[in-house]
Amino acid sequence: MSSMLIVGYGNVSRRDDGVALHVMRRLCERLGLPTGDLDGDAGDLQANPAMIFTHQLGPELAETISHYDLVVFVDAHVAGTDWQPVHWQEIAPAYRPSMVSHHLKPEALLALCQTLFGRVPRAYVLSILGHDFAFGEELSAETAALAEEAVSRLAYLISSEGVIYQPTRDG
């Protein structure tokens, strides 16, 4: 059985930018898993699949993700990229300098894992097209529909990888 971590990130106060949190909650509902404390830079790291949601990716996550066999990064993307509305891509370690030091791309986190811990999990990006990034917490109808497709892809991956929910030690 593979150990799996789902890392959702985005700004839940900017409508579709917070789609990852909605996807993670719907995945928990679909699989009959407790939602735990997914928001607020927290999550259930004892379960399998483990889940964590954060505002943005930072270097402190490198150690956490180094402990897993498989990591899926879930986020929103904007129109104008060559990505599909629900984009699924396997990624590899790659460091690309950023304009801000406190925000990293998933590939850079994998590079940190490799450099600091000598281990890199297999990793994917699951990115959902956002349509409305105004202030608010509800998803646009278009992005909500795409989020359901993203949930289905994650559920399929969990099933195909043999990841089975493991309750935390406390429950």
Image: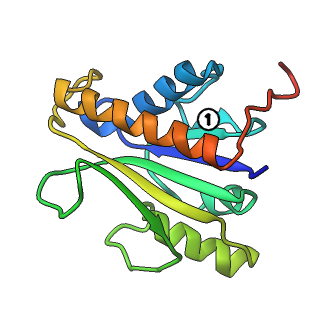
Residue 138 is situated, as x and y percent measured from the top left of the image, at 27, 21
Residue occupying image coordinates x 46% and y 80%? 95
Residue under label 1, please give it. 42
Residue occupying image coordinates x 66% and y 81%? 115
Can residue 84 be seen from the camera position used here? yes
Q: Of residues 151 and 107, which is closer to you in this image?
A: 151
Can residue 104 be seen from the camera position used here? no
For this view, does 47 lie left or right of residue 74?
A: right
- Three-letter amino acid code at the position of disc 1: Ala
Describe the element under mark 1 as helix, strand or loop: strand
Relative to 107, say whether 83 is above or below: above
Q: How many numbered discs, if any?
A: 1
Residue at the right extreme, as displayed: 169
For this view, does 129 lie left or right of residue 48?
A: left
Residue occupying image coordinates x 42% and y 65%? 105
Other residues around mark 1 within 10 Å, as few (<14) / some (14–19) / many (≥20): few
